[in-house]
Image (spheres, rainbow, N blue to C red):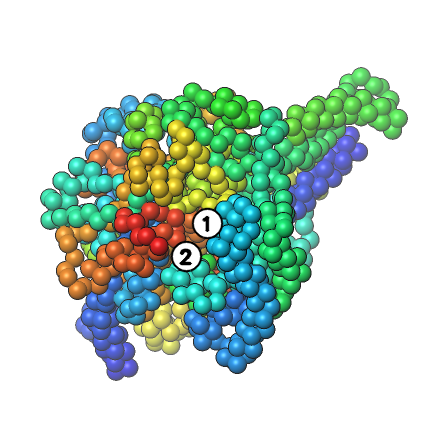
Amino acid sequence: MKNRTYHSILISKGTSRLRRLVSFFTRSWFFFITSISIFAVFLIILFVAKDALPYFHLRGIGEFFTSIKWYPASEPPEFGVLPIIFGSILVTILSTLISVPLALFSAFSLSDILPFSVRQVVKPIIEIIAAIPSVAYGFFALVIFAPFLQRSGGHLLGIGVWMIGMPLFGVIIIILGQAISGKFISSRSKISDFIIYSVLIVPAFHILYKLFKTLSAIKIESGTNAFNVSIILAIMALPTIVSVAEDVLFAAGREIREGSYALGATRAETLLKVVVPAVKSGIFAAVILGIMRALGETMVVWMASGNAAQIPDPIYNIMEPIRTLTATIAGDMGEADHVTGSARYHVLFAMALFLLIFSFAGNLISEWIMSRSRKKWGK
Amino acid sequence: MDLRSRKLLDKTFSGMGFFSIGMLMLSLIIILAPIFIKGTGAFLFKGTIEFRKFNFEQFNRGKKTDLLKEEFKTGEARKYIYDLISKFEEQIEKDDIPDAYKYEDELEETIYHIKELLGPFPGEESPVMMRDRYGASRWDKAKEIRDRILFVETWDYSDKSSMGKLTLTPRINNFRGTILENMFPYLENNLDKLMLPQITFYWNFFFDKSFDSHLFGGIGPELLGTLYLILGTMIFAIPIGIITAIYLTEFAKPGKIINFINISISTLAGVPSIVFGLFGLAFFIMTIKVSNSKSVLAGSLTLALLVLPTIIRASEEALKSVPLTYKEAALSLGAGKIYTIFKVILPAALPGILTGIVISMGRAAGETAPIIFTAAVSVGNPLKLFETLSQPTPALSWNIYNLVTEHESVESIRHVQFGMVFALVLLVLLLNLTAIILRARISKKLRG
Amino acid sequence: MKRITILFFALVLISSMIILSANQKIVIDGSTTVGPIVKAFAEYYMALNKNINVSVSESGSGNGAKSLINNKCDIATMSRFMKGKEFKAAVEKGISPVAHIVALDGLPILVHPSNPVQELTLEQVRNIFKGIIRNWKEVGGPDKKIILISRDTNSGTYETFSKLVMKKEKIVKECEYVGSNGAVKGRVQSTNNAIGYAGLGFVDRTVKALKINGIYPSKKTVTSGKYPIARPLFMFTNGYPKMGSHLYNFIRIYLTKKGQDIIKRIGFVPVTAYKK
């Protein structure tokens, strides 16, 4: 039923003038209130851009994006934001790498694998993870996790090697074993399988063990670094990705799954080869939302990233402190004097503008993807 | 690939699924457990007589007669120590012992620690700072100070290849042969008589204001500030949010305008929280000047923008899920559109809307970045209601950051930090629990 | 009818809130170095006067100056003097900043107590923060990397350090930045190969202050000027406070005996040395 029809039912020719007037005013008033959201977005863009542009007038575009020297207080001041952009991107990418596999597998479990009763327990747990305030996560990262990393960071890495390595290598061994025995052995039997797997396990175990040894020996000098922050951000972004991914997996429906099972596929194959490709845009949108969450987070990075405006050397050394855009805005706002109109103040708004543009882009992309998939599924 | 391997892969896949869920739950436990365990230590601990003295003198709690009886008991126990010290000081003054000057510095440090433990000496004028007016108020701190009295911390730098090692040499060795020597074993064996520890349930921790940089007292102003912020945020966000949702579901015609509104709302949802803070400062305080300094009002407006998308979306969902038959029935009975909305549809959608509201309350309580520049201060009195329009306030979220990073002695107030985090997390979890229960009731209604 | 009465009462409530909200308050913003002093003063003052609310923010000396210039606070606490630019901006906005020196401070160079190094020269500290000296063994300690902790650039303490120690040269990029003196102390006390700097009032048994050029930072060496990194701590007001007002009384606390005792107890050096 379209609104137009309602309107013509309610406001028929016979309606009194008063009723019409009231209806008109109410509609206008409601529209005005609704437009507050639009105003808010416009005002935010306006105020951020208004105070960001003077920076580019004062200093040009090049330095912001190319210089690696962040010395806003020195004379002459230098505003190379590149290491800070790098810091934001680094922790975002790292936390995404950690959270996406965990989140996707959790979403798979929730939608297809876990029994209903367990699901009822797990969903609230995920909501609790989402609800915990970011300053509490920052507190944990700084007060508990950072000293822990300084004391026994190496051991954590060592355990991580086994936790990630075992399933990963397990899958690889199974697939390889299959391929090998398929190609080279005419008659398969349990014994031939056993031999092949044993042969493959040895080098795999060797690699993992070596990795374990090297990583365990690492001594983390400073617990407030990119690694610390990335792990905590991954935990924070998880609920976003899980809930959206789980929604789209669920929305894919039973028919597509039943069709696949009917053809003899296992559950893993159904999920990976049938369901996921069907909803892959939704999953992509979920991942983008998770990325946005990690990019925009302020308190955790402010408290636990070390706030060093540097690109670590070597670049893969994530145990070094870094600095993000959000933490710089929060931390440097104090000295940046509005009144003297300095580049120092405006560069923070330039960073905020950068963040805004990124989050708008991410939002638009994920909205567009979701609307496309909604059209596809006819919802 | 043959069946066996496919089944094996399937099992591995399921295993990884369980593993991920397990990791999730494990991380939650790892994060929450220390907060809850150490957090309860902020208000449930063994308190000493110094704590009860503080409680009585500042808040008039406890019976005076009981306190006097306890003071008498500890007075007797402490007399031994005070007598020894004053006799020893006399000896040094009169040069009655060989090399008296050697002991002066040592004695001064020892007396400093004893005052840390027992408070000012009897007869001294009341010190100006509260931390000096009372001894150790918590039993665990008292034990720490006792160890500091009994042992001198020296660092052994002899091993050139590594950092110094902490060695504890008994302080008594510095006073061998003097009368003060007897104080140390006495202190060691009689600490409980000197301090009278008792299990204390300091539930007023959540209501008292803090004294002397949070060394004493509670987190009342911070908790109140957070509650004010929640209230203020909801006052602005709820009407705007619900009316927007009503407009979107009942009035708006599908087309460009509604698309635009939807995009704006989801854009608003994606703005990073620190940008909200910047905007709050630049717009609400600097431009339209809702207050001439930071204030709860400015902070509430900023937070309201932050939670608006959540409330709008939740209300939209709730309104859309009201069965069409309700509306049709009301209209067919002759009710006007507005009447139908407010008296029929809205009440039916209320549980869903409430869920969205409660979740937003949790967010408003926990967000820090929007209030850094608009509402939060580190120290301040708890505000009366009418002051919220123009004055800033301490708040749990900001003060957690402040106490953990900016405080001058983070180790000595560790228990207060944990208490604050505990209070905030508990508040947010209770709000979310309410939302979960509400949602369960809704789904039961829909199913039943 | 019911709705109208509700609306009426709401209006009355709000207008009374607006009227009554012109309550007595003193808003203080600024340095985290002066923070402990002004917080103790605030508590002392509020205990004596029940109807005034003194609120304290510690967002950095620069932010304090900014708030004062924008007339958003009554007192700006700063651990450095106002810069020329700030003065000019203040005057343009009709604010006349008046400086009150409330205490003296010596910037201690802090290390973990387990660090065997006891003293450094000013030049060594500079070279450490410039990244030229990277390992403790180069200055007589064990073979461990030096972790640098600095105050964030919104700080007067940072400005002092940059001027007096770094002689305006740049700090190496690997240096970690924290937002307050308390945070510097927190990082140094939990990381045994760290080096940082804060205010004198932040030294206790959990961190160690090094001798600089042979001089240990203490009350004596700071007042006599021997300690090379000494500086005054300020409170700035807009003009001189009106005599008898709350602001006037508060600003003058540091001149009273109780105020001096507080400053001494926190660990800074009172401007007038009282003899006991």
The reply to whether discs 2 and 1 touch (Cβ–Cβ < 8 Å) is yes
Q: Residue B361 placed where, x, y %?
A: 43, 61
Which residue in the protein does label 1 denote? B409
Give the residue at the far top of this rendering: A184
Q: Is residue C216 left or right of residue B190?
A: left
Give the residue at the far bottom of this rendering: C1
- In depth, the one of A15 and A130 nearer the eye is A130
Query: What mark, if any, has residue B213 been given in the picture?
Result: 2
Q: Amino acid at mark 2?
A: Ser
Q: Quadrant of the C terminus of chain B?
A: bottom right
Q: Quadrant of the N terminus of chain B?
A: top right
Q: Chain of mark 2?
A: B
Residue at (63%, 50%) from the top-left corner?
B177
Residue at (88%, 26%) from the top-left corner?
A191
Residue A334 visible in the picture: no
- In depth, the one of B420 and B16 nearer the eye is B420
Q: Is residue B446 left or right of residue B127?
A: right
Q: Is residue B204 left or right of residue A55?
A: right
